[in-house]
Amino acid sequence: MSKAGLQFVERAPKAELHVHIEGTLEPDLLLLLAEKNAISLPYRTLDDISRAYQFGDLQSFLDLYYLGASVLVEEDDFYELMWRYLCQCRNEGIVHTEIMFDPQTHIQRGVGLETVLSGFSRAIAKAEQDWQQSVLLILCLLRDLSESEGLQTLRQAKPLLEQITAIGLDSAEVGNPPGKFKQAFKLATDWGLRKVAHAGEEAGPEFIKAALVELGVERIDHGVQCANDPELVLSLAQAKVPLTVCPLSNVRLKVYNDLNQHPILRLLDSGVQVTVNSDDPAYFGGYLMANFNALERALGLTELQSRQLVRNSFTGSFLSEERKTCYLDQLQ
Ligand code: HPA
Ligand code: ZN
C-alpha cells in the first residue's frame, strides 16, 4: 500500500495543539527527578513503570499522571521537562506547538507558579533562539476541583499572563460539566485569553455543546463523542470548530478498543476540522508521529487526508492569520 500520506506528514512542517507538558514526563526523567528530590514512588525501575502504565479509563491514568507530576519541584525540573519536549518537536518537524500545563497540580504541593513558568520560559526562549521553535502556553484548570479554586488560580496567574495565551479545562470529565466553570472562563475572556476545553472524551456530545455555548470555547480538546450525534457533527463542520483529537490516548484510555474503530477519518471526511495530537505521549506510547504512524497502520491515511490534517493543525491554532498563512504556504 502507498505510504505517500505518511511520508508527507513526516516531511511537512506541522503544529501540535493538544499536549500536556506533565504528560511528556518520560519514565527515565521521572525516576531521575524522584531520586534527586527524594520523592517516594511505588516504582523503582523502568519495568515497574511500564507494568503500572496499563489504564482502564481516564481516572486510572490521571491517578498516575498526578503522581508522576509530584517529582517536579525545582525550576530546573520544569526547564528540563519542557526542553526535552521541545527537542522532540525539532526532531519531528513540529514547528509550532500549543502546550497545556496544570498549575493547580503544582501549587497544591507548594510549588509556585513563578517557579513553574520560569523553568518553562527559559526552555522556550532557548528553543526559539536555537531553531525558531514557536510555542504558546495554555493554562488548564482542573475540572474536578471547585470553580472558586480555579478562580483563585487564575488570579494568581494574572501577573504572569504575558506568558499565557489561553485557558483550558482538563482532568476528570464525567460529573464535572463545562458549565461549572462559567465564571472562570468569563474572567479569562475579560483578560483577553483564548479558550479551549476538553469535552466529549469520556462524557457525551452534550459536554461539547455546553463547552461551546456556556464557556464560549474556540476549540474542543478530544471531542470524539460528537461522532454519536450526526447533527452536532454537521454544526461543528459548518462552524469550523477545530477538534484536537488524540488517537493513541483514546485507545490507551479505552475510549475505543482498537484504533480501527476510531472515528477520526470519518469526522475529517465529514468536513470537521480535526487535528492529530499526542496528549500525554510519555504515558500513551508515543509523540505526534507515533500517532500518525498508528493511524496509517490501523486506518490507512490517503495523501489528501494527511494534507488536510496538517493544514488543520495550523488553521486551528492560535497563531495570527499572517503566521498561519506563512506556515500554510510552506506546505504547497
Ligand atoms: N483528559 C483529561 N485530562 C487530562 C488528560 C486527558 O486526556 N491528560 C492530562 N489531563
Ligand atoms: Zn488532554
Image (cartoon, rainbow, N blue to C red):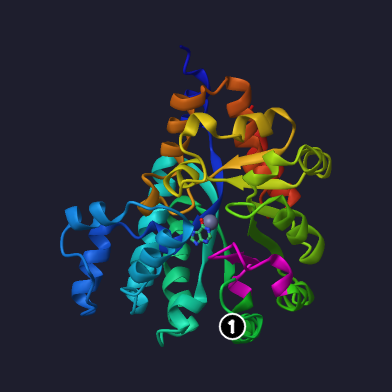
Q: Position of residue 66 (x, y in %)?
A: 40, 70
Task: Identify the amino acid type marked 1.
Answer: Thr
Locate residue 217 relative to residue 63 in the image: left or right.
right
Q: Within the magenta stretch, is there residue 163?
A: yes
Looking at the image, how many numbered discs can be counted on the residues?
1
Residue occupying the point 64% across, 52% down? 200
Residue 90 appears anywhere in the view: yes
Q: Is residue 102 left or right of residue 282?
A: right
Callout 1 crowding tier (Cα within 10 Å): few <14, some 14–19, many ≥20 = some
Residue 319 visible within the image: no
Residue 165 lies in quadrant: bottom right
Q: Position of residue 17 (x, y in %)?
A: 58, 51
Residue 73 location (% of width, % of height): 34, 79
Residue at horizontal 50 percent and vertical 52 percent from the top: 132
- Mark 1 = which residue? 153
Residue interval drawn in magenta: 162-181
Q: From the image, which quarter does the C terminus lie in?
A: top right
Establish if 122 lies above or below 83: below
Q: Quadrant of residue 86?
A: bottom left
Q: Secondary structure at mark 1?
A: helix
